[in-house]
Amino acid sequence: MKILILKFIILLWFILLLVHRDKFRKLIYRTNDWRINLRPMNGKEIKGLLGNIYPYDSNYVRSRNIYRLYVLLLGMLFFTTQAVGKMDISQNKLHEKEDGKRKNKDSTMKKLEVGDNVPHFKLEDQNGDVFDLDSLLGKKNLVIFFYPKDDTPGCTKEACTFRDQYEDFVDANAEVIGISAQSVESHKNFADKHSLTYTILSDIGNKVRKQFGVPGSFFGLIPGRVTYVINKKGKVIHIFNSQTNISLR
């Protein structure tokens, strides 16, 4: 809107400049013939504008000074319009960037609900191999459980419960996957210490946790403990959320 107003002012000012130029040219060329305006700008007009070819002609001097003022203000308006345009472009890009970040944040923090499609992801497992969720979709059911930290009492009990019932999941054609933010090395030590034979993924930075929208516990101070049951089509069919009760029943 500001650009349009400035452009309108420039157009109006340019028209006023042309009207005054008509008077100035007649004074320069000592004629009242309107056809003088059909001639292109030449050295005499430029010299008359920048110099002082009729120093004792008060009408010429006044007209020359007004002409200079018109040209100066027109230039200022032009550069102001350019600056405002660049500022608007920068602000629009900034707003687009902020909107993009906001939309991305909203999409990654959306809480996964029953009936939603599981988000696709790739993470390293406890052996340092890259696990791609797409490799299992359409082939197996999935039991994905997010837990706060390796080798803490509650997480250890939960992980061992999945270990003890692992054959039941296999019989149901389901793959068990544990996810937390610790390193691959930490997961390897955790799995070896408690004989965990299923996949444990290293979600450093909690990127996948955010994709699932796993809620935190105790006012967000502790990462949430949530289990998602996902069918072969990749849809969430059950969610179990508990920070203190790790029973799978």
Image (tube, helix red, strand yellow):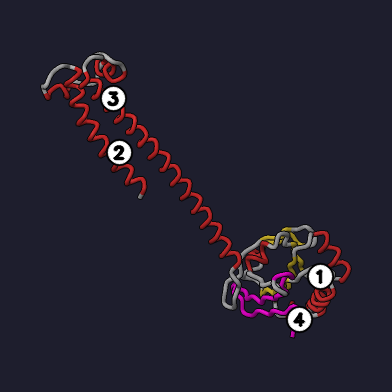
Residue under the point 32% across and 46% down: 5
Task: Tell me if 121 is positioned left or right of 190 in this view.
Answer: left
Q: Earlier in the sequence, mark 3 or mark 1?
A: 3
Residue under the point 60% across and 72% down: 111
Q: Magenta residues?
A: 220-249
Residue 109 picture location, percent across and down: 61, 66
Q: Earlier in the sequence, mark 1 or mark 4?
A: 4
Q: Residues within 10 Å of mark 2 (few under 14, many from 20)?
A: some
Q: Residues within 10 Å of mark 1 (few under 14, many from 20)?
A: few
Residue 77 picture location, percent across and down: 35, 37
Which residue is the site of mark 3? 65
Spatial CA distance of label 2 from label 4 is 79 Å
Which residue is the site of mark 2? 10
Q: In this rendered view, identify the residue nearer to me: 116 or 207.
A: 207
Spatial CA distance of label 1 from label 2 is 76 Å
Spatial CA distance of label 4 from label 3 is 96 Å
Which residue is the site of mark 4? 168
